[in-house]
Amino acid sequence: MDQASLGAFLRIDDSSRVAESRRITALVAEREELTAGRAAEAAIVVSELATNLLKHAQSGVLQITPLSMHAQPGVEILAIDRGPGMSNPSDSFQDGHSTAGTLGTGLGAVRRLSSVFDISSQPGKGTVILSQLFQERPDPALTGGAENTGGAENRPNPSRLSHPCAGFCVGVTARPVGGEPVSGDAWAVRFREDAVLLMVADGLGHGLLAAEASAAAARAFYGSKEESAEGLVQTIHRALRSTRGAAVSVARIEFRESRVRFAGLGNVAGTVVAAGKLHAMVSHSGTAGHEARQIREFQYPWTSDSLIVMHSDGLSGHWDLASFPGLVHRHPAVVSGVLYREAARDRDDACVMVGKGQ
C-alpha cells in the first residue's frame, strides 16, 4: 500500500505541492472506495484549497486524511494558514468571488461539494477551512445557504454515520517534525453504545522507532477488550515493552454518567472544557512500556456542550481558546487546526485531538 493513501500533511509553498495534494487525495479516495465522480469532486476541493494557500497564505499547510479513521469512509481536507484572515468569510462563498488562477468558483464550490464544511477566520491571525467528502453527495439543506458558515448548521447527518454516538465528532491535526517521513505521535478512537474512548500516544524521540512505539500503542488500544481508561493504559504499557516506549493518555467519555474518566503516563496532556471552566486532567510520570510506578484514572465533569483536547508535547500547553471568540462552536477538526497553528513546536512531532458533541 502506498503510504500516501493513508493521508499526508503538506506545506504548500510551491506549485508542485498543488499537484501533489491532488495525487494524494486521489489515493486516499481510492483507499476509501469513493466513486470516480466523488473522487473527482474531492480533487476539485483540494485544488481550490491548495491554490488559495499558495497564492494568499503565510505558512499554509494542508492535511489530507482518510475518514475511515473516524468510523466513516471519505476524505477530509483541512487547510490551515497564517494569512490575512477574513472579517466576513461568507463573502467568499458567493459565485464569482474566486481567487486568481483557481478553478473559478472559489470557496462556494468547496462548500457545495463538501458533505461537511466549516471555517474559522480572524483578521490578522489566519484561516482554517475544513472539507469532508463522504460517499453520498452533500445535503443541500446542510451546505446550500451562504449564511451557513459551519458549526451546527453543517453537522453531518447522523443517519449517515455508522457508529451509535453519531452526535460526537472528533478532529485531529497531526504532523511529523521536519525532515522525518513519519510521525512518532499516534491517535485512536473507539465508539461504544453510550461512550467514546480516545487515545493519544507520543513515542519517545521521533522518526521510525518512535512511530513504531506509538503504532503499537494504537494496535493495543484497538485490540483490547478492556473498556476503562486505566485498564487500557495498563494494556498499552504491557504491549510496548519491546519498543522504545511512549507517553500515552486515554480518555473515556461516558455520556449517561456525564463524566470523563482519564488515565495517562507521561506528557500527553488532556483538558476538558465544561460549563466554561478548564479542567486539566492528571497524567502520572512514566513511560508506557518501561516505567509505570502508578497508573490511576481520574474523573472529570462532562456536559452536552463540553469539549475535550488531548495533545502530545509537540503542542505547547499555552494555547487559549478564549482568544478566538466562537471557536468552541466550530467543528472539532477546525478547533484542532487553530490550536496546531497557534501552539505547535517546530522541533517535535505534533498531534492535537479535539472531541465534542455537534
Image: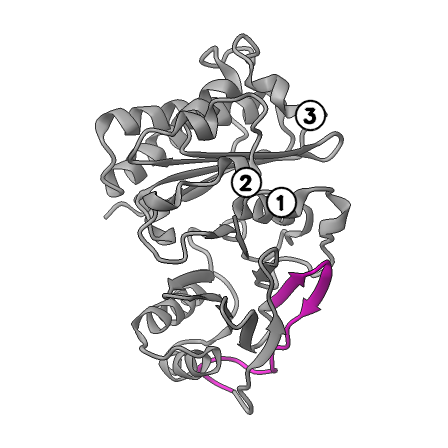
Residue 207 higher or lower than 132, as above or below: below
Q: For mark 2, what is the residue? A: 152
Where is residue 172 shown, x and y percent of the image? Answer: 50, 51
Start-end of magenta stretch? 270-291
| Marking on residue 86 | 3
Residue 173 higher or lower than 140, as above or below: below
Q: Quadrant of residue 261?
A: bottom right
Q: Residue furthest bottom?
A: 293
Distance, label 3 to label 2, CA atoms, is 20 Å
Q: Is residue 15 shown to the viewer in this render?
A: no
Residue at image coords 55%, 19%? 93
Distance, label 2 to label 1, CA atoms, is 8 Å
Where is residue 220 shown, x and y percent of the image? Answer: 34, 74
**What amino acid is labelled 1 in the image?**
His
> Which residue occupies the foreground of this view, 315 or 176?
315
Q: How is the image coloured?
A: one colour
For label 2, the SS is helix
| Marking on residue 329 | 1
Residue 282 higher or lower than 28, as above or below: below
Residue 8 higher or lower than 37, as above or below: below
Q: Residues within 10 Å of mark 1 (few under 14, many from 20)?
A: some
Q: Nearer the viewer, mark 2 or mark 1?
A: 2
56 relative to 153 in the view: left or right: right
Where is residue 343 shown, x and y percent of the image? Answer: 68, 51
70 relative to 108 in the view: left or right: left
**What amino acid is labelled 2 in the image?**
Ala
Q: Are marks 2 and 1 in contact (CB under 8 Å)?
A: yes
Q: Are marks 3 and 1 in contact (CB under 8 Å)?
A: no
Q: Nearer the viewer, mark 3 or mark 1?
A: 1
